[in-house]
Every structure is written in structure tokens, then in C-alpha cells.
Amino acid sequence: MSGFFEGLAQDFTNNLIVGDRYLLILDGLKTTLIIATGAAIIGVLLGTVLALMRLSNVKIGNKWYILRSLSGAYVNVVRGTPMVVQLMMMYYVILSSTSLSKITISIISFGLNSGAYVSEMIRGGIMAVDKGQEEAGRSLGLSRGLTMRHIILPQSIRIAIPSLFNEFIMLLKETSIVGFIGLMDLTKASDFIRSRTYSAFFPLLIVAAIYLLIVTVLTSFFSKLERRLRAGANK
Amino acid sequence: MQTNSVNPLIQTIELEKDFDGLKVLRGINQSIRKSEKVVVIGPSGSGKSTFLRCLNLLEQPTGGQILFEGVDITDPKTNINLVRRKMGMVFQQFNLFPHMNVLQNMMLSPIKLKILQKEEAEDKAMVLLKRVGLEEKAQAYPKTLSGGQQQRIAIIRALMMEPDVMLFDEPTSALDPEMVGEVLDVMKQLAVGGMTMVVVTHEMGFAREVGDRVLFMDEGKIVEEGKPLEIFSQPKEPRTIDFLRKIL
């Protein structure tokens, strides 16, 4: 038994302390959080725009709802192709001639991807708002846009918030594929340590534990926030 | 045309509404004078709510015309948002904005449309709240209010825009019986103040007391109209007689 603990202590020292390898983990963690947060912001903004496009009445000619089609096609393409492929497409093809950093490209890629999913959540939220709300706004002389902005959207985002939180958690874990373009995130850091220490178990265990910890903390924080928002809506 | 069509505030000409082939309104010709109180009654599905909702284009008519203050509002070139400022509407389900408190509900439209400054809007809202006895609810959120309180707020929210006409779509139908009175009182107060009102309702007492004219609708048409006294005590059309017998 003591041998097991000695082994563990040895692993700990080899994988984290020697050569300040814990710094790799911390840097990786920072990268992961930056990408997830940046992508979430882009995702929510883009998702809102896509949802509004999906519900718009702008048409060319008699029945071609151009904004609806564009938004629908975008969502379809993004949801129909793997995230890794999208990321590599951005890095090696679409943005390859730019001087953007790998982190920036990752944020953009994940943001564009997340936007497609978020748009469906917000669209669902918009459609869940009672029809009478729009009628009340319009009957007060507010335009369609003002009604959307001040009456419908605030309510639909409130409705969509649980799924938006969930999307952020998914996003956080999904960023683990940025290693495919050679970016050192949390997951890649463990991989790098393994390549030095030839020990796969310990670095992966540490990394898994960190993901789990973050997700657990976020989940409890989000559910508190959610409860408060719901209480706010009822006050 | 009507005898009272001198300078009508609202005039409908052969107004029609089809919902996918279902004819809900079959040619309504009406003139509503300034200050007139018109009460629309009829069985459910008769088209009375649709008629009311066409007046401010919440429903797009499929035929005929609606003139408001002489302007054809069914003309696509008419800016309907400007027209709607002058036509207040009260709904069966109140439709207060749940994410805003009472004051915010009332101030939203005048402020966003840059009709009033924030302070002016707030002063005006407080005056109206006092008038309906709800000034202590200014900061309250709709969900904490009773149905009767919500509907009174909905009425004065519409009044914030200083409309020339108020449209009421079954304003007391969703209320518990004990709250009907407080809402009708506000409406009566409004009537006394000279507001032009078009009211779809099942409250025959209100129709009799406040109405200048009662329209009885059935199957998308105005079957009979007249002074409340005439309609209620000597209805002529069999369908009116039948309807009144059922509800009175």
C-alpha cells in the first residue's frame, strides 16, 4: 500500500514539479478558458443575429425569404460538419494567409460554431414568448424592431438561459480539440507532459479532474444564477 | 352609409377578413364618431374580436378599407406605427410586460418613441396610477398584481400615448368575478371623460349603461345595431333575440 502512495508521489513530482511542468497545465488552463469565454461571447451575439434572421420577413421577390434561407443554411452546414474539421479548415485554409494567432483563430472557429447552436436556443426562446406580448408592443405604436429588442428578446433570453449555460459547458470541454492545430490548451498540456515523462495516466487524471472541477463549479454557479433570475422574473 | 357618418373617427368600408378561406368578416360598414362608445356583442366565433383587431391592423384585413381620421390605414404606404399610437388597445389577457415593473411598462413606449422625456413620462404615469388608485404599485412587477390590477394598469399604459380611441377586446373575460367591477369602473371613468371607445364584451350591464350604440354580430356580419335600450328591450332580428335570451 505504501508502495502505491510512494508511486503516486513519485508520479506527482515527475509530471508536475520537475521542470515546472505544472506551469504547462496552468497555461493550458488559461488558454482553454480564454477560448471558451471568447467563443461564448461571439456565439451569443452571432446566435442572436442568426435567430433574428431566421424569423425575419425580409424577402426578395414574392416568396424568397433571403435572410431566413441564409441563416438556415449556415446552421445546417455548421451542425452537419465536425468541429475538428471546421477548426482545421479555418486554420489551414480560410485564415491561413492571415497573421491571426492560433488562439484568435480558435476563438473565431468555436464562436462561429457555437453561434449556430445558440441561434436555435434563442429562436426557441423567441417562439416561446406569448404572442400577446408582441401585440401589446405593436399596439402601443412600437415598431417590430423596438418590440423585439425591448419586449421579446429580453424574455426569450431569460427562457433560453438554462440551455445557454449548458452550451457554455459543452464549449469548455469541446475546446480540448485545439491541439489539432498545435495550440497548447489544457488537454494538449497533458499530452505534452506524457511525451516527456512517458506516463499517460497521471497527466490525464489531473487534466480530467480540472475539467470536472471547473464544470462542477460552473454548474452550481449557473444554477444559483438561474434561480435568482427566475426569482427576479417573479418579483 | 350611416346617418352618423359626419366626420367619423373610424370608418370601415366593406371590411373583410379571411383566415385560409374561412370568412370571418363578411363586409362590415361602420362609422364611429368621435366620443362615441360602441359596444360589440355576439356569440363566440361571430368575428367581433377579429373586427376589433382589424381596426388597428393587428389582423390584416383581406378586403375593404379602414379609414382612421380620414386616412386609409389599409394602404401599405400608411405608417401603421404612427396610426397605432393614436389607437390604444386593451387585451383579454392584459399582456403587461412581465420583465418590467409597472412604471417601466407604462413608460416604455412614450420614451422609446421619443414622445416624452423620462421625467415627464414618470410624472404622467404617476398621475394615471393615482387616478386608478394604484400609485403604490408603481414599482411592482405584473406577476405580483391581481388580474383586476393588471388590467387597470394595461388600460392606463395605453392612455400614456394619449390615444384618440381605445379598443377593448373582452377586457373583463379573463378576470375573477369580484375584479370585473374595478376594471369596468375605470372604463366608465374613461367614457365620462369623452374617450372614443370600441368595446367587445359580454358585460351587458356595461353595454347598457355606457354604450351609445350596440352592434350585434353573427357569422361575420353586423346583424343588428342600435341604441342599447332598443337592442336589449326590443331586438328585431331572430338571431339577436336568440342570443340575448341565452345570455341574459
Image (cartoon, rainbow, N blue to C red):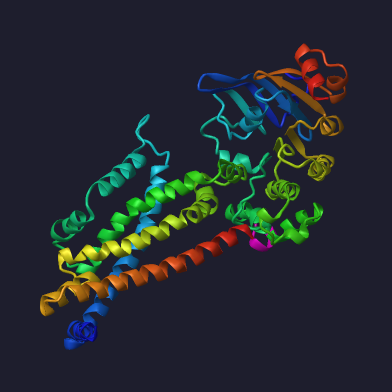
Nearer to me, B83 or B200: B200
Q: Is residue B120 above or below residue A34?
A: above
Q: Is residue A169 above or below residue B38?
A: below
Q: Position of residue B182 (x, y in %)?
A: 81, 45
Nearer to me, A219 or B152: A219
> Residue drawn 42% across and 55% down?
A163
> Residue drawn 26% across and 49% down?
A78
Span highlighted in magenta in the image: B116-121
Q: Position of residue B191 (x, y in %)?
A: 81, 39
> Residue drawn 77% across and 59% down?
B135
Nearer to me, A159 or B138: A159
Q: Main secondary structure of the magenta part?
A: helix
Q: Describe residue B229's horizontal placement relative to residue A3 as left or right.
A: right
Residue sitting at the far front: A1
Would residue B174 be counted in the magenta stretch? no
- Quadrant the C terminus of chain A occupies: bottom right
Nearer to me, B2 or B53: B53
- Quadrant the N terminus of chain A occupies: bottom left
Total numbered circles: 0
Which of the 4 quarters of the picture holds residue A107?
bottom left
Q: Is residue B6 above or below residue A218?
A: above
Q: Position of residue B154 (x, y in %)?
A: 69, 47
